Amino acid sequence: MANTLAQVQAVTAMNLRNIPARWTSALVAVIGVAGVSLVLIAVLSIAEGFRAALEFSGSEDVAIVLRAGSTDELTSGILQTSIPVISDAPGVRRTDNARPMVSAELFVIVDAKLRNKDASANAPLRGITPLAPQLRKNFELLEGRLAREGTNEVIIGNGVAQQYEGLAVGKTVRWGSNDWQIVGRFADGGGIAESEVWADARVVQQAFNRGSTYQSARVKLASVASFQQFKDALGKDPRVNVRIVREPVFYAEQQELMQKLVSSVGWTLALMMGLGAILAALNTMYNAVASRVREIATLRAMGFGAAPVVASVLIEALILGALGGLLGGALAYLLLNGMRSSTLNFQNFSQITYAFTVTPKLMLTGIVYGLILTLLAGVMPGIRAARTPITTGLREL
């Protein structure tokens, strides 16, 4: 075993010393793998950013109340008469003046023009109550002021301000039957709220003919442990027919479809491009073997086995793959990480803003994928090098 390892080390060292002599073909292989890794990480970082925008918004001590059977706000509906029942349920936190921390909300879609694009998109307009900002754990007013209750004033999320044209503090926009004045801009730690426009719920009901109905109620719990008490109480109350979930669970459900879709697209592209990368690496490995026929034959004549020869070719391929994967990951991080964009949320058919999120896990995924590609590319050249007759190689001397 020790002798075999020593042979592998010796042949591998010889291979690596010869790389500068064929640097162009090696560079093609590295760039090919880097390109595949970059595309894979870029697409998967969309799914990661989408997940972060949703899941990181949730708090364990906040519950979402929907109509029974609903999985999202768009298909939900809650009557005005249900809100007092929800507010009086045990387990609800109250303000210093004993007001239940409950925000009855509704969700409508409005048309807005995307910035720097000749296209419009569905922007989410959320009707809220004054307590809504206190129910978002990272809410921060960045500019202007909060909208006044009972008026056509709105505040916009930071993502909305960045992604849509004409939506800025001081501007007026027409949605539904009303003109809306933008009076403030807020952030929410990069969460989903930054993708929304907020207005007074009752005004939104009137402007979009929603009657006195809402689509969800957001509830601040007395404690994390109060969730089950709150859920059980409403579940037994015949006056309401609702579904209650913790906020992080609700957001996890919202991003599941998008996560699967983006991931499948990313891996499909990676597999298609991976074929090209394998061909480039295969050509590199064949050239590497062809340029060292004499050296390999000489080593075989000196007693080196076939296994060390194959192993040395595979190790060289893995090194090129690791370099390519690392380069692709570094480029993805430098060029994309933190860059904001928007995409369609298939759960409610509105745009959601997010930031490309290149995590260490994604970079490791790109490196591992590069290793797999070049390992596959190195198998056949390695076997060829080992099977080349010693006499054939020695004739090259």
Image: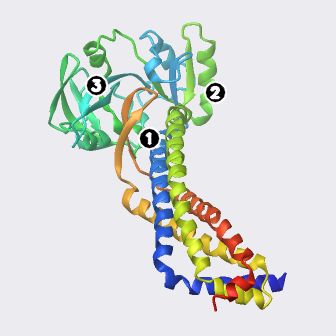
Which quarter of the rendering shows the N terminus? bottom right
Callout 3, which amino acid? Val
Horizontal side, residue 379 vs residue 252: left or right: right
**Residue 172 found in image quarter:** top left
The residue at which mark 2 appears reads as 228
**Residue 113 found in image quarter:** top left
**Up/down of 54 relative to 126, above or below:** below
Distance (Cα) linking label 2 and label 3: 36 Å
- The answer to which of 29 and 175 lies nearer the viewer is 29
- Callout 2: 10 Å neighbours few (<14), some, many (20+)? some
**Which element carries disc 1, helix, strand or loop?**
loop
- The answer to which of 213 and 349 lies nearer the viewer is 349
Residue pictured at 71% horizontal, 74% vertical: 310
Q: Is residue 9 visible?
A: no
Circle on res. 110: 3
Residue pictured at 79% horizontal, 81% vertical: 305
- The answer to which of 305 and 142 lies nearer the viewer is 305
Q: Earlier in the sequence, mark 2 or mark 1?
A: 1
In the rendering, at what x and y percent does residue 79 appear? 44, 10
Horizontal side, residue 115 vs residue 395: left or right: left
- The answer to which of 290 and 113 lies nearer the viewer is 290
**Which element carries disc 3, helix, strand or loop?**
strand
Circle on res. 137: 1
In the displayed orientation, state which residue is furthest to the right.
Answer: 1
